Amino acid sequence: AWTQMEKNSEPGYTVIRPTDKTSFTSYRYSNWKKLILKSKKPIIGYGPLGDRYLIEENSHNTLIYSYVSGGIVSTILMLIIIIRYTYLCLFLTFIKKIPLQKKNIFVFSSIFTISFLLFRGIGEIGIAVFSIDLLVFLSCIAICEKFKIQK
């Protein structure tokens, strides 16, 4: 379905994949269901790019990718990371109440970036694979962890 070309109703536009007027998720939700149902290795998973092994397509979800590639063990570890850094962002913002000053720009930028990348994990796998997203995420959590232990 992805390799077939379709003509759109508007002249001059070519659609690379079929569209579904009833879906707003680009078939991602159905891919998530397919991956979970097709996985026969729930404990250890299929290794790197397990999603492509099962359905020949990207899973577009950090937790689903973790489950398919590393099994339940990997998913639990990814959940721990997500919970830890969601808590850290909330802690620094609402409990530690970082003052809005020029010297704290790196911490604020890091909190925003961590929050964005964690939220983005719903629709992409940026921090679940070795990528620029992961490197930025690791840099930001290092900044926030260092700031947390100061003062």
Image (cartoon, rainbow, N blue to C red):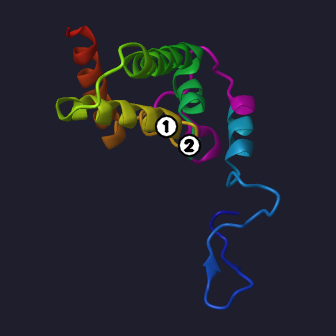
Which residue reaches farthest left?
A: 103
Q: Is residue 42 magenta?
A: yes
SS at circle 1: loop
Q: Position of residue 45 (x, y in %)?
A: 56, 23
SS at circle 2: helix
Q: Position of residue 119 (x, y in %)?
A: 52, 36
Disc 2 packing (10 Å; few <14; some 14–19; many ≥20): some
Q: Position of residue 103 (x, y in %)?
A: 17, 30
Residue drawn at the location 23% of the way across and 35% of the way down: 105
Query: What residue is shown with label 2?
Result: 52
Q: Position of residue 18 (x, y in %)?
A: 72, 67
Query: What span is colored magenta in the figure?
Result: 36-57
Disc 1 packing (10 Å; few <14; some 14–19; many ≥20): some
Q: In this view of the protein, which residue sits in the foreground, 87 or 20?
A: 87
Q: Quadrant of residue 50?
A: top right
- Residue 38 higher or lower than 98, as above or below: below
Mark 1 touches mark 2? (CB < 8 Å): yes
Distance of label 1 from label 2 (alpha carbons): 5 Å
Q: In this view of the protein, which residue sits in the foreground, 28 or 150?
A: 150
Give the label on residue 6, or none: none
- Residue 79 higher or lower than 134, as above or below: above
Q: Amino acid at mark 2?
A: Arg
Query: What residue is shown with label 1?
Result: 49
- Residue 65 higher or lower than 1, as above or below: above
Which residue reaches farthest right?
A: 22
Q: Amino acid at mark 1?
A: Leu
